[in-house]
Image (tube, helix red, strand yellow):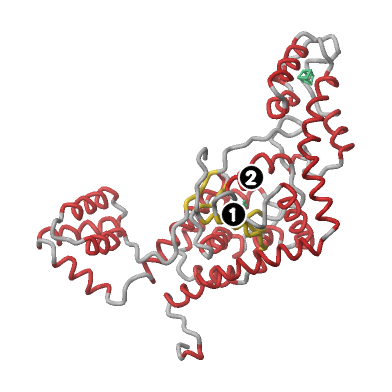
Amino acid sequence: MDNPPQNQRILSGMRPTGRLHLGHLHGVLKNWQRLQQGNDCFFFVADWHALTTSYEDPAGIPEATWEMLLDWLAVGIDPERATLFVQSAIKGHAELHLLLAMITPLPWLERVPTFKEQQEQLGDRNLATYGFLGYPLLQSADILIYKADGVPVGEDQLSHLDVTRQLARRFNWLYGREPDHGERVAESLGRMAKKAASRFKGLRSAWQEEGDEAALAEGKALLAEQASLGPEDRERLLGELEGRGIEILPEPEPLLTPESRFPGLDGRKMSKSYGNTVSLREDPEQVRERIRTMPTDPARVRRSDPGTPEKCPVWDFHRIYSDEATRAWAYEGCTTAGIGCVDCKGPVIESVLAEQAPIRERAAELEQNPARVRELVAEGNRRAAEVAEETLTEVRGAMGLGSPEAGGG
Ligand code: TRP
Ligand code: SF4
């Protein structure tokens, strides 16, 4: 994503995992910072999603939610530019989840790769639950309720986005047809030569019933050739061919977060589950200590042994944090045994501390003033609820769900 999108509705969520670390900053959060300039961004804490795997032990979720929001604000996710909110505060997500559940074929959920994988990985928990199966469905509700154009996610989430897109299409097909759709299609077809019209019908069923992509392509070409069709006919028939209706719920595009394999203190990817993280607000003394004791090239036993930076986790940090001169100094010093590992780590420590300083400062301010944070989040919740309610009104209407007082029930 070298050219960030502009003027789009962007939405993304994170499960509340508590305090965030440097890997989150260099991956997700820097990307959000970029996107919040020039786009209408919605960022939320997916606390209901946390329940899908932690339903037996939900006690930590509120605190993890709070800490995460504080980190977002501290790194400069700006509530003036982006709407920050908490999923469980917007009940509309649950209503849309329920309504979408009605039209979701089970195999769409059962074949999502994360479903089986996570069940295996988290084998100690019973994840043969309805809520866990519905994880991508709830995520779809999160996205569709804001009519997001773009959804920044990591690669592991792409299969969920596929479900979302399929669901949007299915919803629009089921509920986005004009009341007299059948007649209008017949009329448009009537403007085509008989032979072409019957060919069109054959191609449509080959695509919709058998998923024959060549038939879809041929159908499109056929429509393009029909000089007798006006633009409206053509659009209607194209929808008929593809099996989509009027766009009530737009299909979102995934915006793949640039892959950042931010290194952890042990050379593996930085991840809470490896215990190799430096959190964004970690105490400076603790940061010094953790970097000072991090492992180095195992072959460099004595100070007089030359080392191989490529085999050292500290070198990964130099590559991220050091300017060229410092990198050259470290490389040269390591390979000639000119410097010791403690020397080598010095500039890394200083760079990490310098990066954290403004974050720590802002976080301290916010911690002093929890009422202000609560107000910012309440404001975000209000804005989110407004947009969500607008979409829900349309969705209810499209599905024919009237309110009882209007005589619909
Ligand atoms: N499933 C996402 C994750 O684990 C979190 C999430 C929930 C999300 N709802 C979302 C991300 C909607 C983007 C859009 O990372
Ligand atoms: Fe790693 Fe630096 Fe020590 Fe070389 S000198 S082994 S790069 S810490």
In the rendered image, the vertical position of residue 153 relative to residue 186, given as above or below: above
Report x, y in % for residue 42: 59, 58
Kindly give the residue lying farthest to the right in the view shown: 285
- Between residue 293 and residue 362, name the one nearer to us: 362
Number of numbered discs: 2
Tell me: is circle 1 under 8 Å from ligand 1.
yes
Mark 1 or mark 2, which is nearer the start of the sequence? 1
| Mark 2 neighbour density, 10 Å: few (under 14) some (14–19) many (20 or more) | some
The amino acid type, in three-letter code, at marker 2 is: Val
Q: Quadrant of residue 169?
A: bottom left
What is the number of the mark on residue 28? 2
Q: Left or right: 236 with respect to 375?
A: left
Q: Pointer 2 and pointer 1: residues touching (CB < 8 Å)? A: yes
Q: Is residue 240 visible?
A: yes
The residue sitting at 79% across, 59% down in the picture is: 63
- Rendering quadrant holding ligand 2: top right
The residue sitting at 81% across, 30% down in the picture is: 350
Report x, y in % for residue 371: 80, 64
- Between residue 357 and residue 207, name the one nearer to us: 357
- The residue labelled by disc 1 is 12
The amino acid type, in three-letter code, at marker 1 is: Ser
Q: Secondary structure at mark 1?
A: strand
